[in-house]
Image: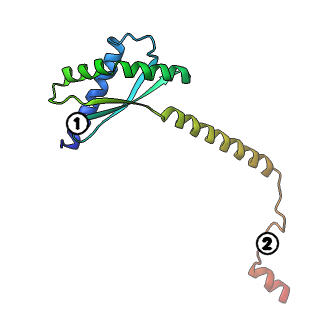
Amino acid sequence: MASEARARKLADRVREIVAETLEMKVKDPRLGFITITDSRVTPDLREATLFYTVYGDDEERAATAAALESAKGILRSEVGRQTGIKHTPSLAFVLDALPDNAKHIDDLLRAAAESDAQVHAQATGAHYAGDPDPYRHPSDEEDASG
């Protein structure tokens, strides 16, 4: 087992190598506008998971996933060549859900802002149902009894 710091450094290096190789060496037309967002390496340094996002619709995402799957061997050999470690980690690509989650949060915030605006519009010009000051004050009781 490697230290956590070594695994993190290797994960960062793998992310850089894969991103650079995808940009410079992989010429697959199915590969869309891809960004490698994160990478994680298991503690034994045998498996690397790379998270990516693709600009476009579901069809372009599927085509990019197929292109990554076919380029996995080239990418792994490049990682092994540039890192020089004894066992090159196997690569797994996972579509990052971060943009979808961010869009969902934006939609929720927009709906909350619209709801707040409706409540604010209803509250302008509204009056309390009872007296303006429903609490008894000691000075009022003394005046009434005296």
Q: Residue at x 32, y 18 (%)?
A: 20
Residue 46 vs 74, above or below: the answer is below
Q: Residue at x 81, y 66 (%)?
A: 132
- Amino acid type assigned to the residue bearing label 1 in the image: Leu
The percent coordinates of residue 120 (x first, y second) are 74, 48
The percent coordinates of residue 42 (x first, y second) are 27, 39
What SS does tag 1 mark?
loop
Residue 48, by quadrant, is top left
Disc number placed over residue 72 in the picture, else none:
none
Q: Residue at x 79, y 72 (%)?
A: 134
Most extreme residue toward the bottom is: 146
Which quadrant of the figure contains the N terminus? top left
Q: Which residue is mark 1?
A: 45
| Mark 1 or mark 2, earlier in chain | 1
The percent coordinates of residue 3 (x first, y second) are 19, 43
Q: Residue at x 44, y 23 (%)?
A: 65
Left or right: 143, with 84 as reference point: right
Colour scheme in the image?
rainbow
- In the foreground, 41 or 90: 90
Residue 117, by quadrant, is top right
Give the spatial CA distance, label 1 vs label 2.
70 Å
Q: Which residue is mark 2?
A: 134
Residue 70 vs 37, above or below: the answer is above
- In the foreground, 29 or 139: 29
What SS does tag 2 mark?
loop
Q: Nearer the viewer, mark 1 or mark 2?
A: 1
Is there CB contact under 8 Å for labels 1 and 2? no
- Amino acid type assigned to the residue bearing label 2 in the image: Pro
Around disc 2, counting alpha carbons within 10 Å, would you say few (fewer than 14), some (14 to 19), or many (20 or more)?
Answer: few
- In the foreground, 88 or 33: 88
